[in-house]
Image (spheres, coloured by chain):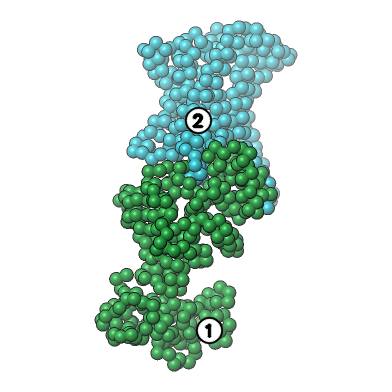
Chain colours: A green, B cyan
Amino acid sequence: MPNTSEARPLVSFEGVTKHYGTVAAVHAMDLDIYAGEFLALMGPSGCGKTTSLRMLAGLEEPTEGEIRLDGKRINEIDSADRDTPMVWQSLALFPFLSVRQNVEFGLKMRKIPSRDRQQRAMEWLERLEIADLAERDISQLSGGQRQRVALARSLVTEPRILLLDEPLSALDANLVVKMQGVLSRLQKELGITFVYVTHSQSEAFAMSDRVVIMSQGRIEQIGSPKTIYRNPTSRFVADFVGSNNIFCGTVSKEGATLQVNTSVGCFSCSPDNDENSFPMGSTLNMVISSDLVQISLTTPEAANQVRCRFISEEFVGSIVTVFAELENGADFKVQVRQRDLADLGLKAGAVFYASWKATDVHLISESA
Amino acid sequence: MTRLSGQNLLLRGYVVLVFVFVFTPIVTSFVFSVNSDRFPTIPLGHFTTHWYETIFADPDIWEAFRVSALVSVSVATLATFIGFCTAYTDYRYNFTGKALYLSLALLPPTIPLVIMGLAMLALLARINMSGQIHSIVVSHVVLCAPFAMAVVRMRLAQINPDLEPAAWNLGASPWRAMREVIIPFCRPAIASAFCLTAAVSFDEFAVAWFVSGLNKTVPVMILEILQGNTDPQINAIGSIVFAISMSLVVIAQLIFFRKASAPTTTGI
């Protein structure tokens, strides 16, 4: 990962706002993107992530603010002159051209002689292991093959930055994992910047150096996947990450170990990585990551525990997500190893105890 | 099963009847064009190509075919160009008054031809442009451009809206993207629109009659012969006109739908 404090950003958004009529799709966005990093823009649909990417590609013009590429303002520069190729969600391959002609397109626009561009297109097709399909029609290719053509077409001009707009959303799950590997490897080999828009947490976390979480046109948090996962700075992010239990409460005892009163009980929290201080009586959100929770059939020793009723489980392999209900009806999620759950032999409606360490709690102030 | 096939038979019979109804006059006309008798009567006389020989020997008819061909090719070129531009404007841009723009663009074929012919004559006469070949061309372009627009619009409705921005994104200027992406994508529709508008212009009588003056097109010629005397020459000309315009329409259909039905070989 690049040294973010010293290196000059390759791309910077400075107070960028995009209005469609009266609707603000992106609101006063500040973001620096560094050379060589894999950055994911993630958020629910309509959060402004695709609009941001399109503004960077020159397909939308910011209403306010400035976008800089290499320190130079590019607001008014046509998409054609930016060299910010994009891999489209629909792939947007040209159906009337062969695979090779598709890949050559960017070179042709740059007036590269025919022999030269043919050779360079073939090199990229080889690199993406589809050289044998060069003369095929696009309609003859499978989804994964088309994906590779789209990548080759965007990379053939050897840009410094590649924009990707949910490129894997149309693929089968097993192919998604495979293409994630291809993308990660390519990005490391080429050393160029990837800006990757997705709504999929697993895609963003698996590949990126930094993740930008967006909501309603604003950036909620920027950080490494691990930071986002363990230290969400707002309730939105904690919710969006999807595996957290969040309870709203008030501080009933100050100190290194806080006591927090919630609707499901009183818990002690001593988060070791939070800079925030929470005075007596302040309200906050208590976040308990579902993978940091232990379960047992008998009352555990731990101070922080809740009594749960087993509702259902979602099996995703070695890890199982248990969906349970607390005594007041609130939902509670726990992730455990499939073997451990099998040992407990829980059935629907069975009662069990969930417990967690005071140091594993993450606190977010209510205003965030 | 039996009931189903009975129903099937009935439907087939119905379709055959419809076609018989539509094509009987044309077939009749063709039959009498190769019949030796002066008047269309039954029983038929013997087979002859006499009437075709007569019309091919007539310089006026050759001239009418020349005018018609010149007009329909010019009309097809202009109307397809204008139709393409109109359809692209509709596809690409949103602007106030777009609904009005579209309905005006599609209006001409709904105007009764006689009214249209009269209006064209009035206008062209006022600006000293009536009675010439280009008066027919101008009038037919007005009439045909909406057909071209409709055909190209149908094709543009199938385009992935990301294709054009993808070309820009890869370094194409708007004009280049038009040339490299939009036109190749629309090529079957453009060819099809060309044939269709050529056929419409080749067939059109009413407007041509008003504005053609001495430059008679084939349909105008047919009426003049018909007013003077009826003989199977008319049938012969009619058959040729039918063959030409049907070929154009069929070619238009084939070009437009060839892409869609082309077998996609799987190479996976």
Q: Nearer the viewer, residue A248 or A197?
A: A197
Q: Would you place residue A61 above or below residue A251 in this image?
A: above
Chain letter, disc 2 residue: B
Q: Quick one: label 2, few (<14), some, or many (20+) residues within 10 Å?
A: many
Q: Quick one: label 1, few (<14), some, or many (20+) residues within 10 Å?
A: few
Return the x and y of residue B1 as percentages of the image width and height: 69, 51
Q: What numbered label is drawn on residue A48?
A: none
Q: Which amino acid type is marked by label 1?
A: Lys
Q: CA distance from mark 1 to mark 2?
A: 68 Å
Pointer 1 and pointer 2 on the same chain: no
Q: Which of the 4 image quadrants contains residue A245?
A: bottom left
Which element carries disc 2, helix, strand or loop? helix
| Residue farthest toward the front in the current orientation of the protein | A6
Q: Which amino acid type is marked by label 2?
A: Ala
Q: Would you place residue B80 above or below residue A53 in this image?
A: above
Q: Would you place residue A155 above or below residue A225 in this image?
A: above
Q: What numbered label is drawn on residue A347?
A: 1
Using residue A303 as the reference point, say whether residue B246 is left or right of it. right
Q: Nearer the viewer, residue A249 or B135?
A: A249
Using residue A232 as the reference point, say whether residue A121 is left or right of it. right
Q: What numbered label is drawn on residue B148?
A: 2
